[in-house]
Image: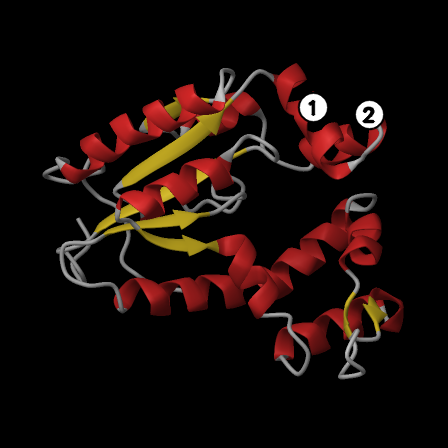
Amino acid sequence: MNQERPDLLLVGLTGGIASGKSAVADRLAELGAVLIDADVLAREVVEPGTPGLDAIVARFGAGVLHPAADGGPAELDRPALGAIVFADPDARRDLEAIVHPAVRARAVELSRAAPPGSVVVQVIPLLVETGQSDAFDVVVVVDLDPETQLDRLMARNGLTREQALARINAQAGRAQRLAAADEVIDNNGTPAELRNATDALWHRLRTASPPRRPSHGTLSP
């Protein structure tokens, strides 16, 4: 178990794009979890004036910026950057090499600040792809049928089928995620069913002792 903060239960929450991770995370936060969202941190570490944004511009050029609405410093144009990285695996890896270390470092800071006895849930879309499974006591995967995932992504983001498939295929496959899971939340049903499944998960997490994974890593960026 984690030798640095053995009083915490460290939970890694993941799932494919449009799988329903946010709904599960929001409910866990309502129930009392300390929530750390990698997507939120990924935005924080590339805000204007950060080393992260400077590195992105150095790699991808000023075309990935747009003027701030309030006339302030230029901000990251996420759609422009996304169009580049989802079409080019090398570009995507370069972006990840910039953003991921900064996000991990910030997540560690927040985990270390959690109150004793907390269930700390880190929402990490690319948890499996980045090899972070062993950093957690419990890995939770939100799962759904691939066609349902595709339909939800197209509807949510206004994407074509080809665009949605490109984003799905840029992540780990379903089987790879499930192989890393200690807990699986099925999101093929209704929002009420997802909520009930999340509530049941919370009960299991609160009563998890000792942690499920006998040899997860320490809190480190």
Residue positioned 81% across, 46% down in the render: 88
Q: Above or below — where is 92 with respect to 149?
A: below
Tell me the amino acid under the disc marked 1: Leu
In this rendering, the count of numbered labels is 2
The x, y position of residue 32, in whole percent, is 26, 48
Q: Above or below — where is 194 with respect to 15?
A: above
Task: Answer left or right for 55 relative to 44.
Answer: right
- Give the secondary structure at mark 2: helix
Instruction: Name the disc covering residue 161, or none.
Output: 2
Q: Residues at badges 1 and 2 in contact (C-beta under 8 Å)?
A: yes
Q: CA distance from mark 1 to mark 2?
A: 8 Å
Tell me the amino acid under the disc marked 2: Arg
The x, y position of residue 103, in whole percent, is 50, 63
Of the two numbered discs 1 and 2 on the same chain, state the one appearing first in sequence: 1
Instruction: Name the disc covering residue 150, or none.
Output: 1
Residue pushed farthest right? 63
Query: Which of 202/122 is in front?
Result: 202
Instruction: Name the disc covering residue 77, or none.
Output: none
